[in-house]
Image (cartoon, rainbow, N blue to C red):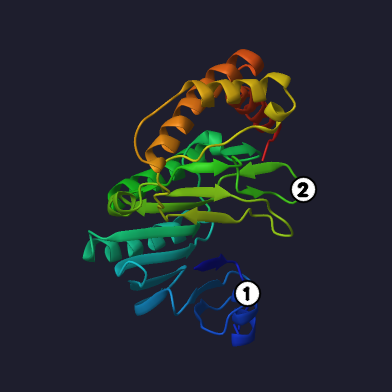
Amino acid sequence: MLCIQETKKEVIERSMCQALWENSDVRWEAQPSVNSSGGILCVWSAKSFKLERKINGVGFIMLVGKWRQETQTLYIINIYSRCDIQSKRVLWDNIKQLKNHNPEGLWCILGDFNSIRTPVERVGVCNRGVEVNNSREFNDWIAELEVEEAPWVGRKFTWVRPNGTTWSKLDRFLVSAEWLTKWPGTSQYTLDRNFSDHCPLLLRSKYVDWGPKPFRILDCWLFDNSFKKIVHESWSSNQHRGWGGYVLKQKIKSLKDRLKVWNRDQFGDALRKYKRIEEDLNKMKRY
């Protein structure tokens, strides 16, 4: 499902939705912009999501339907909030009433909330006093809904002022406890932005059990003269009895253990080095 805020479109045509989805089975629900301001759009595949009910309210679109792959009922709300606190309070109250009518279930509330939760979610010019009060109300609303942010991966901020003076985290996914129980591997990813001043967000909720971890090698091992020797010694020294599949499994297991020790002695902890470099690079990025 694709959810867009600030479409700046008064009319959404089928050709546009098909171009976005690149498939003829596309379905959509839209809220038009007002004088090229605002606008909300939800696009999805009819083969994946069966719409049962929809509510098109001020600043939001709510979709209720079945996720066909797992026959689960989903409650999805796409939000574009105005900046003034009075409009936010009206929006928050409307969403809270909808949630109270269906307190349990798989809820996902997403979009541009135009609010931050803590001071660290904004860097740059702002009105600190007003912002603290708004953040408190925003957090209270999230707590009353009994939803929480899915774990984050990627950039710290989701919006940047065009002149580069302010960076903020205004966009997010809020999901219910039932959602996280159903899909414990849920994460939200901050992707690279292009022409927009907002970064697109991606929510991954599909959990796949790939079975045992695969056997992997690092390219640098192949250039080390002792690598082949270690493999040969491990393979030759471990003798197991049983049917072929079992013997192969045990030999690979022994080889993995031997290579783990050899890699640490020969190259150090490569994964830890990688993580440290990644952290240093992320610290250099401001948004």
Q: Position of residue 126 (x, y in %)?
A: 61, 40
Q: Is residue 223 above or below residue 104?
A: above
Q: Position of residue 186 (x, y in %)?
A: 42, 49
> Which residue is identified by label 2?
163
Q: Is residue 32 left or right of residue 77?
A: right
Q: Is residue 71 left or right of residue 57?
A: left
Q: Residue 262 versus residue 129: which sits nearer the camera?
A: 262
Q: Is residue 78 above or below residue 192?
A: below
Q: Residue 270 versus residue 257: which sits nearer the camera?
A: 257
- Report whether residue 272 is seen: no
Q: Amino acid at mark 2?
A: Asn
- Report whether residue 199 is seen: yes
**Badge 1 density bin: few <14, some 14–19, many ≥20, Cα 10 Å:** few
- Please state, as top left, top right, bottom left or bottom right, where the C terminus lies in the image: top right
Label 2 SS: loop
Q: Residue 73 versus residue 109: which sits nearer the camera?
A: 73
Alpha carbons under labels 1 and 2: distance apart: 29 Å
Q: Is residue 116 above or below residue 11?
A: above
Q: Amino acid at mark 1?
A: Leu
Residue at 40%, 46% in the rendered image: 211
Q: Residue furthest right?
A: 163
> Which residue is identified by label 1?
20
**Badge 2 density bin: few <14, some 14–19, many ≥20, Cα 10 Å:** few
Label 1 SS: helix
Which comes before the other along the chain, label 1 or label 2?
A: 1
Tag 1–tag 2 contact (CB < 8 Å): no
- Nearer to us of marks 1 and 2 is 1
